[in-house]
Amino acid sequence: MEYRVAKFEKVSLRQFASDFITCIGGTEEAAAKLYGNVVLPVRATAGSAGYDIISPVDITLYPGEGIKVPTGLRIKMQPGWMLLILPKSGLGTKFRLQLDNTTGLIDSDYYGSDNEGHIQVSITNDSRSGKVVQIPAGKAFVQAVLVPHGITEDDAAEGKRKGGFGSTGV
């Protein structure tokens, strides 16, 4: 059974530019040009579980190098669902391209956070054979999978999210 529980959206140009400058460097003008490269994720086939996330920027990573990529995306999900960010298997097996946090987890309340719920992905080229990873703008570099989750019967969480990447503790 398929559940329609979420919708991808672009973050505002202002938010994308701010995160682009922080993550990549450059100017607001450069960010504005790249904002047009932001594409809402789609599944490659009707049987695919993952939605391909497209890089809005050209990425070149030498062995040991990493980058945080502002995707320009956010996702509005129903409560009880989360989004997992996973590497594309081809990039992982050919180049050992890895997510810095092994698996990205986007909570349903991230959408309303201070940064508009902007999904940013930290990746590293962990190649041990000297391979350089090149991902042109417009190519899928990670995939996103929607997953239901439960909570314990005695759960009493009341906190309010403010951001991402460690905003709830570490």
Image (cartoon, rainbow, N blue to C red):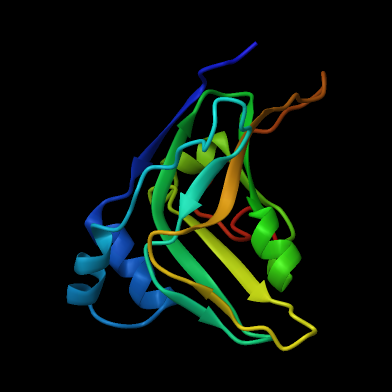
Q: Nearer the viewer, residue 99 or 158?
A: 99
The reply, left or right, for residue 161 in relation to residue 11 is right
Q: Nearer the viewer, residue 113 or 140?
A: 140
The spot of residue 61 in percent (x, y) is: 57, 82
Eyeballing the image, is 134 above or below 166? below
Eyeballing the image, is 150 above or below 93? above
The spot of residue 123 in percent (x, y) is: 62, 69
The spot of residue 1 in percent (x, y) is: 65, 10
Please give the name of the residue rendered at 33% of the width and 54% of the height, measured from the top-left corner: 38
In this orientation, does residue 4 appear? yes
The reply, left or right, for residue 58 in relation to residue 160 is left
Eyeballing the image, is 126 above or below 94? below
For residue 148, which quarter of the picture?
top right
Q: Nearer the viewer, residue 17 or 159?
A: 17
In this orientation, does residue 160 appear? no
Position of the C terminus, as image quadrant, is bottom right
Please give the name of the residue rendered at 61% of the width and 32% of the height, measured from the top-left corner: 48
Please give the name of the residue rendered at 27% of the width and 66% of the height, measured from the top-left corner: 34
Please give the name of the residue rendered at 35% of the width and 48% of the height, measured from the top-left corner: 39
The spot of residue 119 in percent (x, y) is: 48, 53
